[in-house]
Image: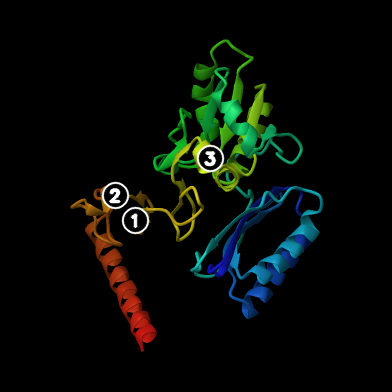
Amino acid sequence: MNNIYKIVSLYSFFTFQENSIIELKENLFSIEKNNDLSGLLIIAREGLNGTICAEKDTIENILKLIKNIVGNNKLNIKVSYSKQKIFKKLKIKIKDEIVTMGVQEINPSKDSGTYIDSFHWNKLIKDKNTIVVDTRNHYEVSIGSFKKSINPNTENFSEFPEWVDDNLGKYLGDDNSKNIAMFCTGGIRCEKATSLLKKKGYKNIFHLQGGILKYLEDMPKEESMFEGECFVFDKRVALDHELKQGSYSICYACGMPISIEELKNKEYREGIQCHFCVNKFSDNDRKRFEERQKQINKLKEKNQKVYKD
């Protein structure tokens, strides 16, 4: 294998003690000093969530550290590879939630829906008695999703509880026997969503174990029911069915994924605007974005020159 970097996405809901949070943070930054480690980890009292990118041996050392803290709780690991770093550096954020929903009364580590693995997922979502809900943001859904899944059209995950209150009943009608199957990128949002639904009294709730990333890792392409590409929150932007970097770029002004065709739009200016945000920013904002892009281009030219020399 020519790929250098191993990329591990993971999450776990468990009660994280404050002293363990501090210890893990210090150990990870210590590892970063002597290794080519990058990534983003979010830590809260309810668990941890994130993606790390490094050489294989470094990744294994980090996983040992994390497993010592997590214990018997699931780490929900998804693996991919890249020839380039997918983050600039290692960031560790300590927050109130590892994925922000804003509902304090739920506890996914104690009460959540039923895991469905990749190989049983197809059967579940083909069932006429099943409604399938994509718990991701609208821009993620726009570049790829499962066939006939419901798009809540949310800007962020904290809007999902309101969507449930206002809309889920319309899809269920009076049939309490219907299955509710939910999914997301790596499994964390749909797992938390199942905990919310159970709190609200819904029955027959299922979620895709490991999310889309695990499904793509497990499922042969000819049997896959996922259409399009899977958005990821790193430099790769999106992954195809082989978990390789897909065809999308990103607008660094608004953060929206941009297809190859959309790059040709007259509104698109690299690093400054795209057709999604052409009316969202002021002229002063665009001047600032333009200056930032000039600096990025200079750095690229400098690096290319060093590489050629």
Residue that label 3 marks: 158
User: Which of pointers 3 and 1 indicates the residue nearer the eye?
Assistant: 1
Residue type, label 2? Cys
What is the secondary structure assignment of the residue under circle 2?
Answer: loop
Instruction: Report the number of discs.
Output: 3
Say whether residue 34 is left or right of residue 260. right
User: Which of pointers 1 and 2 indicates the residue nearer the eye?
Assistant: 1
Residue sitting nearer the eye, 224 or 139? 224
Real-space CA distance between mark 3 and mark 1, rounded to the nearest whole angstrom: 23 Å
What is the secondary structure assignment of the residue under circle 1?
Answer: loop
Give residue 212's quadrant in the image. top right
Residue that label 2 marks: 277
Real-space CA distance between mark 1 and mark 2, rounded to the nearest whole angstrom: 9 Å
Residue that label 1 marks: 251
Which comes sooner in the sequence, label 3 or label 1?
3
Task: From this view, report whether residue 284 is shown above or below residue 214.
Answer: below
Residue type, label 1? Cys
Marks 2 and 3: in contact by CB < 8 Å?
no
Q: At 50% across and 39% down in the image, what residue appears? A: 222
Task: From this view, report whether residue 158 is shown above or below residue 259.
Answer: above
- How many neighbours does mark 3 have within 10 angstroms: few (below 14), some (14-19), or many (20 or more)? some
Real-space CA distance between mark 3 and mark 2, rounded to the nearest whole angstrom: 22 Å
Q: At 29% across and 66% down in the image, what residue appears? A: 288
Task: From this view, report whether residue 106 is shown above or below residue 172.
Answer: below
Of all residues, the one furthest to the top in this rendering is 174
- Give the percent coordinates (x, y) of residue 283: 22, 59
Marks 2 and 1: in contact by CB < 8 Å?
yes
